[in-house]
Amino acid sequence: MCETGCPLGVKIKEFIRFLREGHAALAYEKIREDNGFPSICGRLCHAPCESRCILIKEKAPIAIRALERYAADFGKSRVARPAMTGKMAVKAAVIGAGPAGLSAAYALAKQGMAATVFDAGDRPGGVLRYGVPDFRLPRKVLDGDIAEILAAGVELKMNCLVGRTVSVEDLLKSKFSAVLFATGAGVPKFMDVKGANIPGVYYGEEFLFRANLTKTNIFNRHVPTFPLGKKIAVIGSGNTALDCARAAIRFGLEVHLIFRRSEEEMRVRTAERVYGKEEGVKMQALTRPVEIIPGKNGLVSGIKCVRVNNIGDKMIVLPKSEWTLAVDNVVIAVGHQPNSHAAQSCPAIKINPDGSIWVDAATGMTTMKGVFACGNAVTNAGPVAQAIAAGKTAAENILSALQL
């Protein structure tokens, strides 16, 4: 039952059997048949497989995600990697070195098709490197999974902005038989609240990007390298919001997480919510922000809120419930939308009204022949495991289109 819930189709029963027999390396290899990111999924996956476990009826499903993490952490070092020999004749260009793009490149390389990944950043990983805090995904772990993917024959071209550095048309005219857009959904959704443009307001993706780039060592472990006060409000109830709140805690700030849902309705795993509370995040549930208030210096000085009650699909504002929280900064983390800037540089590619890239549902191809798209650039937003699975499916679509 659990295997039907895994978006990647990992052979869960078989890798757990290897673990029971004491063969962590074999379990790791079994997972990598379908998933190029075992260490990452073992930490970040929303674990839909566990909700399909037959023991869910007993409220005690098998801890599949933790077992995958164990297999990756203890099996990877015991696997010998053969050196890549020879060159693959048919090549594909993958735009975006995030989870979907690297997953697609890995799946293509496993089937004998060379894949070159282009990315505007200086290091691969995309949202995994710049949008997930180090305490949830250590950079050493991320680099380890990426190194395994590169060892399969994947090539990287960093600091290359497709659409500016090189065009899609140029890629197709050169050595590439197909192009895949896997540019993710790293553009923040803006919030219609008064004062959202005041200095001192950050958006979730920007805040995590800055936090992840903060250089830490034994002398400045808790010192941010961007302007922050001592008290901060984070708006949102998803993973990005909670990650921002927990990252701010590590800078020594007083953190209030403001959201319209109840704590039980937060769109995060229960364990992550518990960790946040244990670390000191103050949960302001059933609360809606009304206005971000500027101070005399023009910077953020507070946030005005009201208490709400959710009845069915309706949100009711409680009378006389307005209150103001004095804060130095506000982080708005209420969602994100597709990053289709590279695709927009090619007029032949259709972009949907929400900014996502249109693709044929059966083939994954865009309106431009030979150009495909996958992941959050198509679906608008989704969990990491689904983005990785989308990359794997896109690789299958490319191979089918090229009849390889």
Image (cartoon, grey):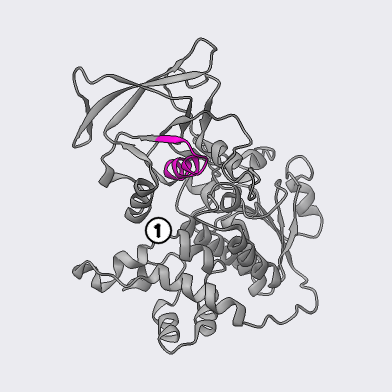
**Residue 386 locus on image (x, y percent):** 47, 58
Picture layout, residue 307 above or below residue 366: above
Q: Amino acid at mark 1?
A: His
Decide which of 75, 250 is in the foreground and name it: 250
**Residue 365 locus on image (x, y percent):** 58, 54
The answer, for residue 398, to whether it is visible in the render is no
**Residue 21 locus on image (x, y percent):** 43, 90
- The residue depicted at 26 percent of the width and 40 percent of the height is 262
- The residue depicted at 55 percent of the width and 46 percent of the height is 131
Magenta highlight range: 240-255
Label count reads 1
Question: Disc 1 designates what residue?
Answer: 46
Decide which of 313, 28 is in the foreground and name it: 28
| SS label for mark 1 | loop
**Does residue 53 appear left or right of residue 376 in this picture?**
left
**Residue 80 falls inside the magenta stretch:** no
Badge 1: residue crowd in 10 Å (few <14, some 14–19, many ≥20): some
Picture layout, residue 127 above or below residue 74: above
- The residue depicted at 69 percent of the width and 40 percent of the height is 346
User: What predominant SS class does the magenta segment belong to?
Assistant: helix
Decide which of 80, 6 is in the foreground and name it: 80
Picture layout, residue 175 above or below residue 285: below
Picture layout, residue 390 above or below residue 329: below
Quadrant assignment for the C terminus: bottom right
Quarter where residue 163 is shown: top right
